[in-house]
Image: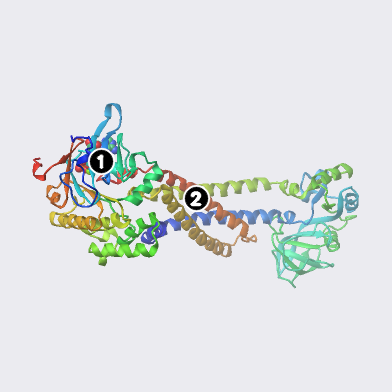
């Protein structure tokens, strides 16, 4: 476990860029502050503690990895951060919004406006083309049509998908689909990009390509990103690494310490 | 960008089949209600369309105009009752006739032109005014001559009526004098020609119900009815309308339930994309609206197809009775199908509301 005590004097000012020496508990100015979050599924006899007193903070502009074996609680953690799941205890601040106190409608709005998700699978709406998948999320925050079109085209271009804009997801390869999902996640200019095992369905070369692209998009735009992965080789594209084991979250000081 | 429209465009076959099925159901409801309306109209349209506030039968007639016999002088006795503005005799019987060279059964009504008891539903020409003229529903054209058998009375058609039949027979309306002649010639040896009923209008502001009761009380040997009561009491009509009501109602209910289930199936099939849409910040309300819009599109397109099928069927089927499409009935049916389909769509919307957006994450 990390020291949950916030040491304000040792904190560096906010700003993009990695700060690997930063303690996981972070400082008051961090974009994302996860404080003592626990999650228990079910109750009584069948209760499963998926997350146990997790604390972390991520600065604006950082791209961090969340590593851990299957069933360790990675998806649970980013679901709580992204306002998809409520925590059993603890708080999650994004900027000055406490996600854990939002009501159902506010959470839906929060997800549309401030979070970009890339899920492991079934990422795209099957009856919308690549371009429409991007344009759709713009309608959730009432972006003017013209601005949305321009942004969608620009993102598709950057992601190397300009020629595939009019294809339905079923007509795209796995890597292309994940790239469309990245575009979709960035479409509404979110504060936070949450990515759950983006490379699980891809081979290594393609996986690297997608993660590189993800890093570039996040860095170029000054976004904050968290990527769940089980693949140690993807860690080199991230600024910092957190690890979960059996619901216990730790900040890994240097990737070489990842013995397991 | 509309989810509803995009999905329909990308799943044309699925929505096409669904629309076809809904169209057949709406067609069945439209055809059944049109035919039952036509049948009831053909049986009792003459009474329904009688221009009068109320009608008087002989008290022994057991509410049946055909069984009623009144002295022609009864009209004056009825007219004398306080609250009655005007009253005049109405006669009717069934006879054979030569129409366009063929022999047929017809129902003939005698009425006093311009007085209570005239028919309504004129579709072309005019109502008869002088002896020998006739307005018809269901036989011949304006200018044709109809010869009554065995009376030999010749009648010239001056007007065509709609929804004015009785007993599902071609029905003729002629001035009372012509009617009397024909009746006397059909029944030789009668001392006088009885009438079947007296139609009356009530004075301004008078209550038809109360006046009908006053007539029953004041004139010996008669019973007064408001027109609506008289129509409702026609023997057998209640069971016919009830049976058809059950048939149409049941078809309607089955149709709605099937439509509701269709959309529930479509929704359940789409749970994965719907969960994703919820996860990326779509409100339940917007997804519900998507389903409602799709139901509306399917029902409207299906209704247009059903309407076309009904038109074809009404023209193509030989039912032996005049069948006319009633725009009110059709519009009402379509609106009812639409509204009840939306209500049935609540099944889907309930399912959508139960979606847990968290289940979109990971490989779960
Ligand atoms: N809805 C649920 N109900 C009950 N238990 C759950 C639920 N979701 C997850 N769990 C349990 O919580 C624990 C953590 O699950 P989680 O999905 O967060 O793991 P993960 O690290 O994402 O695993 P993976 O790498 O396999 O995706 C697991 O033991 C899992 O069985
Ligand atoms: Mg997971």
> Residue B244: image x %, image y %?
60, 49
- Left or right: A207 as drawn, with respect to B324: left
Q: Is residue B255 visible?
A: no
- Disc 1/disc 2 C-alpha distance (Å): 41 Å
Q: Which mark is residue A77?
A: 1
Q: Which mark is residue B193?
A: none
Q: Secondary structure at mark 2?
A: helix
> Residue A105: image x %, image y %?
40, 45
Quarter containing the N terminus of chain A: top left
- Which callout, 1 or 2, points to the residue nearer the camera? 1
Of B22 and B78, the residue lying toward us: B22
Disc 2 crowd rating (10 Å Cα; few below 14, some 14-19, many 20+) is many
The residue to which callout 2 is attached is B341
Q: Secondary structure at mark 1?
A: helix
CB at mark 1 closer than 8 A to ligand 1?
yes
- Left or right: B35 as drawn, with respect to B118: left
Looking at the image, which residue is at 73% across and 46% down? B233
Task: Report the label total.
Answer: 2
* Quadrant field for ligand 1: top left
């Amino acid at each position: 476990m990390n020291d949950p005590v916030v040491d304000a004097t040792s904190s560096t000012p906010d700003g993009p860029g990695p700060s690997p020496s930063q303690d996981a508990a972070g400082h008051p100015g961090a974009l994302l502050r996860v404080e003592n979050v626990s999650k228990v599924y079910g109750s009584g006899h069948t209760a499963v503690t998926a997350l146990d007193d997790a604390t972390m903070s991520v600065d604006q502009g950082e791209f961090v990895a969340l590593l851990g074996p299957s069933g360790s609680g990675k998806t649970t953690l980013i679901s709580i951060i992204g306002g998809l799941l409520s925590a059993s205890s603890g708080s999650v601040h994004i900027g000055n919004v406490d996600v854990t106190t939002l009501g159902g409608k506010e959470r839906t709005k929060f997800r549309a406006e401030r979070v970009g998700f890339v899920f492991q699978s079934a990422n795209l709406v099957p009856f919308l083309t690549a371009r429409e998948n991007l344009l759709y999320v713009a309608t959730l925050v009432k972006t003017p049509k013209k601005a949305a079109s321009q942004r969608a085209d620009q993102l598709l271009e950057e992601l190397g998908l300009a020629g595939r804009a009019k294809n339905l997801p079923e007509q795209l390869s796995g890597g292309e689909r994940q790239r469309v999902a990245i575009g979709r996640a960035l479409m509404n200019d979110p504060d936070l990009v949450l990515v759950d095992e983006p490379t699980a369905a891809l081979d290594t070369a393609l996986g690297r390509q997608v993660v590189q692209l993800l890093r570039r998009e996040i860095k170029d735009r000054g976004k904050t990103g968290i990527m769940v992965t089980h693949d140690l080789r993807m860690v080199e594209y991230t600024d910092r690494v957190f690890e979960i084991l059996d619901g216990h979250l730790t900040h890994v000081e240097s990737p070489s310490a990842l013995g397991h | 960008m509309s989810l509803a429209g995009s999905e329909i465009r990308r799943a044309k076959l699925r929505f096409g089949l669904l629309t076809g099925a809904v169209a057949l159901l709406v067609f069945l409801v439209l055809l059944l209600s049109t035919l039952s309306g036509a049948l009831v109209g053909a049986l009792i349209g003459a009474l329904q369309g009688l221009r009068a506030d109320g009608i008087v039968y002989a008290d022994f007639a057991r509410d049946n105009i055909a069984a009623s016999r009144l002295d022609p002088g009864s009209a004056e006795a009825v007219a004398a009752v306080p609250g009655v503005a005007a009253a005049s005799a109405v006669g009717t019987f069934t006879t054979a006739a030569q129409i366009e060279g063929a022999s047929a059964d017809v129902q003939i009504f005698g009425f006093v032109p311009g007085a209570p008891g005239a028919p309504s539903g004129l579709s072309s020409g005019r109502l008869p005014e002088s002896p020998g003229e006739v307005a018809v529903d269901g036989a011949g054209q304006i200018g044709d001559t109809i010869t009554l058998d065995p009376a030999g009375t010749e009648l010239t058609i001056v007007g065509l009526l709609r929804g004015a039949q009785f007993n599902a027979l071609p029905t003729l309306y002629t001035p009372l004098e012509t009617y009397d002649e024909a009746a006397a010639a059909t029944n030789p040896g009668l001392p006088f020609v009885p009438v079947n009923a007296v139609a009356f209008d009530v004075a301004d502001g008078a209550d038809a119900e109360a006046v009908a009761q006053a007539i029953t009380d004041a004139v010996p040997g008669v019973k007064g009815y408001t027109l609506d009561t008289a129509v409702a009491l026609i023997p057998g009509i209640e069971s016919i309308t009830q049976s058809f009501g059950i048939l149409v109602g049941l078809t309607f209910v089955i149709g709605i339930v099937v439509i509701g289930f269709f959309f529930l199936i479509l929704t359940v099939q789409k749970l994965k994309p719907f969960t994703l849409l919820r996860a990326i910040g779509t409100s339940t309300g917007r997804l519900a609206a998507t389903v409602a819009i799709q139901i509306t599109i399917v029902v409207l397109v299906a209704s247009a197809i059903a309407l076309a099928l009904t038109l074809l069927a009404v023209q193509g089927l030989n039912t032996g009775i005049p069948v006319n499409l009633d725009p009110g009935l059709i519009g009402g049916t379509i609106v009812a199908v639409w509204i009840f389909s939306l209500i049935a769509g609540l099944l889907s919307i309930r399912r959508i509301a139960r979606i847990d957006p968290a289940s979109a994450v990971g490989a779960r």
